[in-house]
Amino acid sequence: MQKSECHGGVQLRNRGADNCDQRTSSSIQIKHRTTVQQGKSSSSTSSPESARKSHPRPSDKLNPKTINPFGEQSRAPSAFAAIYSKGGIPCRLVHGSVKHRLQWECPPENLPFDPLLITLAEGLRETKHPYTFVSKEGFRELLLVQGAPEKAVPLLPRLVPVLKAALVHLDDDVFARGLNALVQLSVVVGPSLNDHLKHLLTSGSLIIIKSKIPTYCSICC
């Protein structure tokens, strides 16, 4: 009788020891999994990509991002940007090693000035590439075609307010592009522009233009 009781006690102790070993093994596995997960999370937060985002490189300032007209923007695009992204400007920008140029889909002299010239004038207020170059160069090249005076003079009542908006813009580069465009337009249309100067050179715009003239000279020179 005593032997059976002793034998039963040994079995109970063995079962208890087995249960304890299983609990210890499970606890070790759980701790191991937790350690692995923490290691993965810490390695992901300390990855080179996250480090670059938190600590931008100096070269990022030298190579600013340009606008992708076909990509999603954080805010609604301007009228000119929307027209350009939809192919409403019949030219494309050709990047060169020294300077950029425009390649027209057809000879510029065959293009209607209305509304293309006005659209390009509205683009002078853009502040990001490639819109700044396309609007400035497109406006200039369109005024160089044969028959430009006859095509541009009827558009003066609509062109002058657009150019005025560029001249009173807070951005100095926009002002410089607007003033250059006004000079180019005056060379083409001649005295026909005189009747519109009173709308262009109001007292408020004159104050802004005079304050920006030194900046314009430094940009051009």
Image (tube, helix red, strand yellow):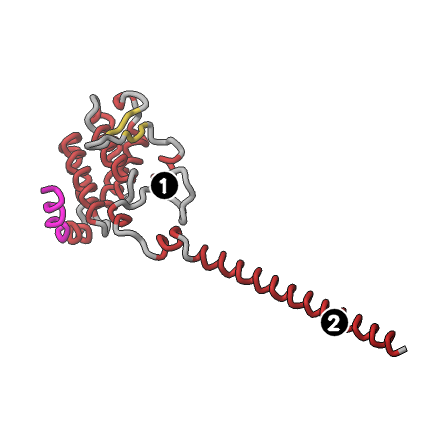
Of 83 and 218, the residue lying toward us: 218
Asked which secondary structure carries label 1, the reply is helix
Does the magenta-highlighted stretch encompass residue 11?
A: no
Of 41 and 34, the residue lying toward us: 34
Of 17 and 91, the residue lying toward us: 17
What range is drawn magenta here?
A: 210-221
The amino acid pointed to by label 2 is: Gly
| Image spot of residue 9 (x, y percent) | 81, 75
**Would you call the spot at circle 2 few (<14 residues within 10 Å), some (14-19), or many (20 or more)?**
few
Q: Name the residue carrying label 2.
A: 16
Residue at the right extreme of this rendering: 1
Does the magenta-highlighted stretch encompass residue 217?
A: yes
| Image spot of residue 31 (x, y percent) | 58, 64
**Would you call the spot at circle 1 few (<14 residues within 10 Å), some (14-19), or many (20 or more)?**
few
Q: Up-down: is 165 above or below 191?
A: below
- Horizontal side of 14 relative to 198 (left or right) equals right
Q: Residue at x 31, y 29 (%)?
A: 92
Residue 24 is tagged as none
Of 205 and 32, the residue lying toward us: 32
Q: Quadrant of the C terminus?
A: top left
| Image spot of residue 137 (x, y percent) | 23, 33
Asked which secondary structure carries label 2, the reply is helix
**Main secondary structure type of the part rendered in magenta:** helix
Q: Up-down: is 7 above or below 206?
A: below
- Which tag, 1 or 2, sits closer to the chain's start? 2
Residue 79 is tagged as 1
